[in-house]
Image (cartoon, rainbow, N blue to C red):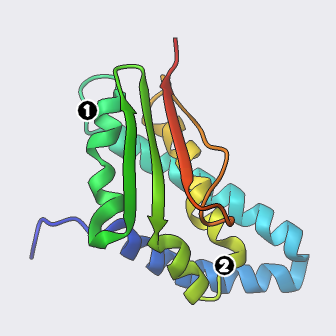
Amino acid sequence: MTDKPMPMIEKRRIEAEIIGEIYDVLKERHGKEEAQEIIRISVANSAITQGREFRAKYDHEPTLADLAANHHLWDMDNALERTYLQETDTALDYDITRCEYARMYRDMGLGEIGHLLSCNRDGSFCIGFSDNIELTRTQTIMEGADHCDFRYRLKS
């Protein structure tokens, strides 16, 4: 037995295998739009819960530095290429220039909902992690951009 955490990309792959099957049934019974909305809401709720689990590890209100200290879990197995642009007490800005999550979802035949399975989680994670952190992102590789622009701010 090891204490090494499971790479997040592996966790997402396992989840996607199950969610993909659920998505197919939902599409068949309720149509594509409703199926995607159900997946979006469910995954966002899961991300809020995960954010709360990460929050529980701290004896203080988590900071942007605490958020950044956890990035290695998402980066494991060379899953992301991340370029930091700004790291201060009130701002954390970086771009993702390579995303293996996007490739994995496409390879699994889940490209049309990859953004719901992964990108959708990021802002929701913040809700559970800290009341003081918010994310702005205008584009993602998953949805066709050449990079993802993550801009976290500490609320005043």
Residue at (37% x, 76% y) in the render: 10
Q: Answer left or right for 150 relative to 5.
A: right
Give me the C-alpha separation between circle 1 and circle 2. Answer: 35 Å
Q: Position of residue 71 (x, y in %)?
A: 32, 50
Q: Is residue 28 left or right of residue 66?
A: right
Residue 59 in which image quadrant: top left
Q: Quadrant of residue 25?
A: bottom right
- Residue under label 1, please give it: 58
Name, please, the residue furthest toward the top: 156
Q: Counting other residues with Cα less than 10 Å from the Cα at mark 1, is it few (<14), some (14-19), or many (20 or more)?
A: few
Q: Residue at x 37, y 69 (%)?
A: 79
> What kind of element bears circle 2?
helix
Identify which residue is drawn at 56% across, 82% down.
Answer: 18
**Residue with the mark numbered 2:** 111
Q: Secondary structure at mark 1?
A: loop
Q: Check disc 1 and give the amino acid type.
A: Tyr
Q: Is residue 30 above or below residue 136?
A: below
Q: Quadrant of residue 14?
A: bottom left
Please rate how many residues cluster around mark 2, counting C-alpha atoms within 10 Å: few if below 14, some from 14 to 19, many from 20: some
| Total numbered labels placed on residues in the image | 2
Image position of 96 (left or right of 70) = right
Q: Earlier in the sequence, mark 1 or mark 2?
A: 1
